Image (spheres, rainbow, N blue to C red):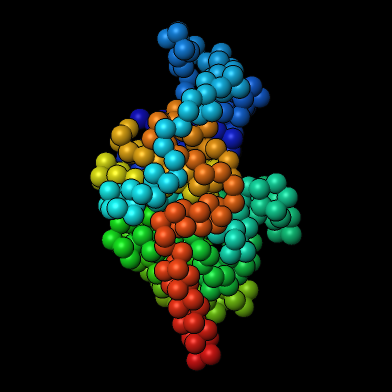
Amino acid sequence: MISLLILPRCCTINVKSKGRILTGKGLSRLHYVHRKISSRFVCVQKLDLNGNGYSGVLGCQKSFQRGISGGGHGGRKQSMTLDDIAKGIREKEYKRIVVIAGAGISTPSGIPDFRSPGSGLYDNLQKYNLPYAEAIFAINYFHHNPKPFFALAKELYPGNYRPCLTHYFIRLLHDKGQLLRMYTQNIDGLERMAGIPDKKLVEAHGTFATATCTLCRRKYQGEDLHNDIMEGTVPHCSYCKGIIKPDIVFFGEELPQQFFLYLTDFPMADLLIVMGTSLEVEPFASLSGAVRSSVSRLLINRELVGPFAWGSSRQSDVAELGDVVSGVRKLADALGWMPELEALMADDRQKASKKREE
């Protein structure tokens, strides 16, 4: 049996078939009708404050009205604060912290995000003459014309950018033995560069660290493609001459098996930190609701997203809105970790400088 999941505020449809989750491009007419009413697309059945159910477009409209009138996150007093979260981390009340992160943690490093109007990656791809912006990550288009992707890969390739304070904060959580896992949407490799080990990292949308021949499926290390990508050429397999593709998850491809660690990680988590993500791309976005209802969730983001914005937040949720790095710095200050964090960053910068000289 195949089922389609209609997603909010994006043109991605995920198909689940025989236990596999695939990503794809498309915008259904049903989604379009709902989107015109509200950018907050919710489930078909929605209950109002009196317990009455509304379905379809009416259900979305009622949810939208509740959001405006204060029935959601802003309608009740937040019972926890950032200081409470910091106290729990500092005193080791939180020993199994899960972090989920998106492009917003990498923009301070100079990497553009995907969807910001004007500055986002999708708004600046005209030079590649694509039929539509997302085609650069569509597997069918890649097979037809891989050159645009490899031109973009040259710009995004690991090593062109350095991790920022946010990446090192997550590294520090690991060093202190409190990071259960980090789930990232990013393909830039900055988490690895910051020293977060493979076993603690789930790169949900793939990685440049490894690659696979699209024809014979032979495996390669990312470094094997470095020279070709930097020279602007398409890398080919030395055995069958097929195109070698970095293990980035394209629209139309399966998610990496490692993603399904969430099935065991999230029931164990005692704190969830969400940072720098729009929570618009499924199935990654659903991770924000996968922890137990008693678990605190901290959002560090420019705006309310996902359950924090849909009126399904919890009393133990905390939202620190604004610039992500500023929010992380505020948390680190509350923890008393800033001197340690700055020393870690300085040490890594020194090591990177020495490596470049060699």
Q: In this view, does 199 lie above or below 315?
A: below
Residue 176 position by quadrant: bottom left
* Left or right: 131, with 302 as reference point: right
- State how many labels appear: 0
Image quadrant holding the N terminus, namely top left
Residue 20 visible in the current orientation: yes
Determine the residue positioned at 35% across, 42% down: 20
Q: What residue occupies the far bottom of the structure in this picture? A: 358
Q: Where is residue 257 in the image (x, y as percent from the top left)?
A: 33, 52
343 or 30: nearer the eye? 343
Determine the residue positioned at 45% across, 73% down: 343
Q: Where is residue 252 in the image (x, y as percent from the top left)?
A: 48, 47
210 or 295: nearer the eye? 295
Q: Position of residue 213 (x, y in %)?
A: 44, 66
Q: In this view, does 227 lie above or below 316?
A: below
Q: In this view, does 28 lie above or below 139?
A: above
Q: In this view, does 86 lie above or below 81?
A: below
Determine the residue positioned at 26% across, 41% down: 267
Q: Position of residue 74 (x, y in %)?
A: 54, 28
Residue 21 position by quadrant: top left
* Left or right: 134, with 47 as reference point: right
Residue 284 visible in the current orientation: no
284 or 180: nearer the eye? 180
Residue 90 position by quadrant: bottom left
Determine the residue positioned at 49% across, 40% down: 319
